[in-house]
Image (spheres, rainbow, N blue to C red):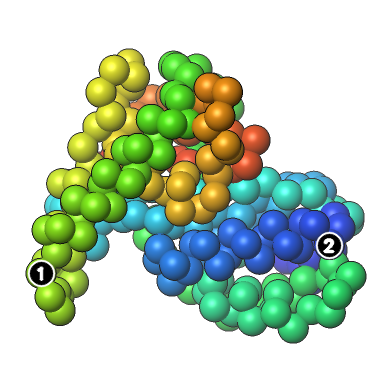
Amino acid sequence: MQAQNLVLGDPQVRADLKNLVSRARSADDGAVRLQVVGNTLAAYVCVLRPRILGEDMPTILGMRAMPLAEAAELDTTVALAAVADRLARMEEGDVRLPVPPMTVSESWAGVAAPRSGWQREADVPVALLEQTAHRGIREVAARMPGNPGAAVVSSVRGPVWSETIPGLGAPLPAGAAFAALTLGFLPDPAGGAAAALFSNGRWLRLSTDRGHVLVRPPSLLF
């Protein structure tokens, strides 16, 4: 039986989840997949994805693992807005999160990333990821016409965020850097901080102690 409430580890976990939901909504105000295994909540959000059939855009997800005070059973995909509303209603010090009862259907949530078998490919400087993300943001803004429709937005963003970052030994798209920056997963680049890049088949994972960015190519979605 799926849990109706999640007891978060402490108020800081609530703050972390609230921050993730808020940041995810700024990129794609869609859904969040809440998956619980034992005392760990994995929250998945989508930052970039193909919008039309055959579009050459990888699906790029963010994931944070957070501790629960009580073990539960849950795997549901719900609206980000619904979770944000419930987090906003929680009083200071409250750690009991009601799970929204209404689920949503999202194609990106239907294919789970591997849990094991990841191979480390490289350490990617945080400074490089920040530079890549900011350069892409400027490029998208420069190319975007006024009042664009959805098809135009996709045609502009796709080539920019699908372009791979050179010299990493694995085809990491620039969109992964954008996702890591948008979701607040990048630590301070001072002192040569780096993110770890892993591969598993055609999946890629970019990880820091603040969260994980998961990348799957279009062919795994359509």
Q: Nearer the viewer, residue 145 or 206?
A: 145
Q: Quadrant of residue 154?
A: bottom left
Q: What residue is rendered at 73% in x and 49% in y?
A: 66
Q: Is residue 61 visible?
A: no
Q: Nearer the viewer, residue 49 or 16?
A: 16
Amino acid carrying mark 1 in the image: Pro
Amino acid carrying mark 2 in the image: Pro
> Taking 77 as reference, is 215 left or right?
left
Residue lying at the far front of the rendered structure: 190
Q: What residue is rendered at 44% in x and 67% in y?
A: 26
Question: Picture coordinates of residue 18 (x, y %)?
Answer: 66, 66
Q: CA distance from mark 1 to mark 2?
A: 43 Å
Q: Residues within 10 Å of mark 1 (few under 14, many from 20)?
A: few
> Taking 109 as reference, is 68 left or right?
right
Q: Mark 1 = which residue?
A: 145
Indicate whether 76 appears above or below 44. below
Q: Is residue 24 visible?
A: yes
Q: What residue is rendered at 62% in x and 48% in y?
A: 64
Nearer the observer: mark 1 or 2; the answer is 1
Q: What residue is rendered at 52% in x and 74% in y?
A: 79
User: Which numbered circle lies on residue 11?
Assistant: 2
Q: Residues within 10 Å of mark 2 (few under 14, many from 20)?
A: some
Element assignment for label 2: helix
Indicate whether 23 appears above or below 136. below
On-image quarter of the N terminus: bottom right
